[in-house]
Amino acid sequence: MKATCVVPLYVKCNQTVTDIHIKDSYIDEFSVGPIEIVEHNGENLFKADLFFAHSMQGQEKLCLYAKDIDGVESETVCIASSIEPPDPCISSPCYNSGVCVADKVTGGYLCRCKEKYFGRHCETRLDICHPNPCLNDGICSTRPGQLCYCRRGSGYTGKYCDIDINDCKPNSCNYHGTCTDTGKKSTKCDCFGRYNGTTCDFDKCPDEDSSLFECPATDCHKDTCNRNGVCTEGGNCTCASGFTGPACNTSVCDISSSITEEIKILSPSITDGSILTCYTDGNTILPCDTRIFLATSSRLQPTVKVDSSLAAGNVTVESITPSNEFPGKTGIFSADITVSGHVENTKDNHVCIIASSG
């Protein structure tokens, strides 16, 4: 397609102008019409129309001069022409509210598409759910804010339903063992010594003191060694330091002298670096506690302080009482540590327990 232009030329001259000559040009086609005398702004001028056509877009130069009847030439005048293609965006070629941007050099255009659309004319909608990015039978959604809806009861959560939900509950092992999540809706209980069963619900010595973690040996009961020794098979007592006799009921010295440290934490208490798992409902900490055992050389009740990273949570020492869970030993105390309140970050929190002699 060629662009055709007509430009009027005016020449002021005292003699009759006989010719307007094209000197230099890169224009495809050009011609000058007849010269005539016209009146322009109160004076007589010589006028001719310049016709030219060009198939290439962009700027081109055309130089010309006039000659009078005596052959005198005027100065050379150069005209710069700029040929632009028609606006391709007039036809609104972009769909779905895409913005058309014209290229004046090439005459082409491009479409800037809105979010979720693509294609030459923004004609195709992006389907974020094909293929389905949700795992474990999750349902993909195009609604803002949530990509995957995890099916209730699937055992998974997370942006792509790819995170296994911890299926352990506070009472999964009936408070008689430690629960471990082993996969999709599956748990395993590691029971304390006196308990058995899938959920630690079978007590192997139901008639014994419930505070004992292990069942006494055969022919042993909680008072066999008067709490001053360890009962072994056959009802035999191994007395603690400071006691003697078949039933460890004879005191021979002060047991407190056998404790070499002023105060120490005894097993089965949690130790330095142990993990205490607490469960939450939203950001509310569900009832969570643990018990520690302390031995003091003074036999006086110790003092227990706590420190934690839970800004909105509470870690408290509920009670410090003499303990009878260690037969044959005195100067032993137990303390119940309770964690409650709210939590912002459910991981990587710490609780420090500091015990000192009373």
Image (cartoon, rainbow, N blue to C red):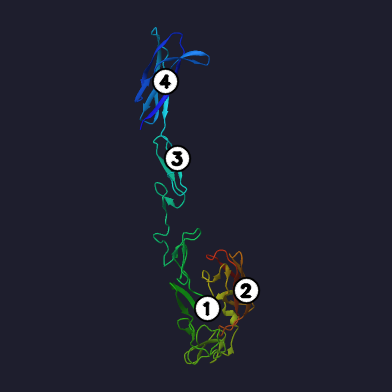
Viewer-nearest of discs 1 and 3: 3
The image's mark for residue 317 is 2
Q: Are marks 1 and 2 in contact (CB under 8 Å)?
A: no
Q: Mark 1 points at which residue?
A: 171
Viewer-nearest of discs 1 and 2: 1
Tell me the amino acid under the disc marked 4. Answer: Asp
Q: Can residue 261 be seen? A: no
Q: Can residue 108 be seen? A: yes
Viewer-nearest of discs 2 and 4: 4
Counting from the top left corner in percent of width and height, residue 288 is at: 57, 74
The image's mark for residue 310 is none
Q: Name the residue under label 3.
A: 90
Local packing at callout 1 (Cα closer than 10 Å; few below 14, some 14-19, many 20+) is few
Q: Mark 4 points at which residue?
A: 49
Q: Distance between the residues labelled 3 and 2?
A: 78 Å
**Chain-order first, disc 1 or disc 2:** 1
Q: How far apart are marks 1 and 4 (CA)?
A: 101 Å
**Chain-order first, disc 4 or disc 3:** 4
Rendering quarter of residue 185:
bottom left
